[in-house]
Amino acid sequence: MRTTGLRRFLVGTGLVACTSGLLPAVTAEAAVVTAHITGVVKLRVTDHENFIADKVCHATETVDFFWSSNDGTKKRSAVAYCGGEVRVEVDHFYTVNSSGTVNVHAFGRLYEGGSHDTTDLDGKDERKFSVPKGPGVDVSFLALHNSDEGGDSSFVDFVLERDVV
Ligand SMILES: [Ca+2]
Ligand SMILES: [Ca+2]
């Protein structure tokens, strides 16, 4: 193997010492970091109409939870309805790494049909981002458009921040 060969060469030349047994054994597990994640997920939904004004609807999901680097993935969900015809679902998944960085994977789906319960999926979006420390700002967003019939849309803003506790 190339690395082994190089190492053998360097040891042979005396450029590196053979360190076997000289380094402390790495037995400590990675530190567990807990993050406090707060903010809001804001959904704005437009139900497009052909002969009357479009309907615009808003929903806000509050985010406020503690999550550690040992906890795996946390799922949060939000939903918004508009005009009797449009439903928007957002799933957002959180993981915390050992340095305290909070990573988010967000998925949005826009359904449009004869009622709020329609299963007609007309638009979707997906994004990965991380949550910064400090005051909450617009971290990321999803943009959903009805790519089938057109007109209907939704914008989902993630306004999040985290502290390591
Ligand atoms: Ca409509
Ligand atoms: Ca549809």
Image: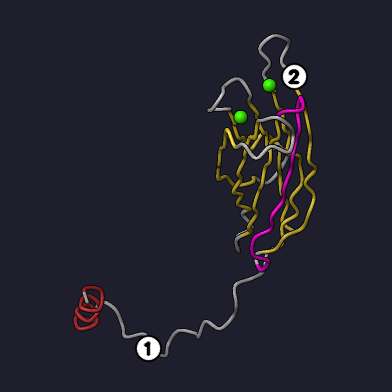
Looking at the picture, tell me which residue is in the foreground, 121 or 26: 121
Location of ligand 2 given as a quarter of the image: top right
Q: Which mark is residue 55?
A: 2
**Quadrant in which the C terminus appears:** bottom right
Q: Position of residue 102 (x, y in %)?
A: 63, 53
Q: Is residue 103 left or right of residue 86?
A: left
Q: Is residue 22 above or below residue 159?
A: below
Residue numbers of the magenta segment: 70-85
Q: Secondary structure at mark 2?
A: strand
Residue at 74% over, 21% down: 56
Residue at 72% over, 28% down: 85
Looking at the picture, tell me which residue is in the foreground, 93 or 48: 48
Magenta-drawn stretch contains 78: yes
Q: Which residue is mark 1?
A: 20
Q: Residue furthest bottom?
A: 21
What is the C-alpha distance between the residues marked 2 and 1?
71 Å
Dot 2 amino acid type:
Lys
Asked if ligand 1 lies within 8 A of label 2, the reply is yes
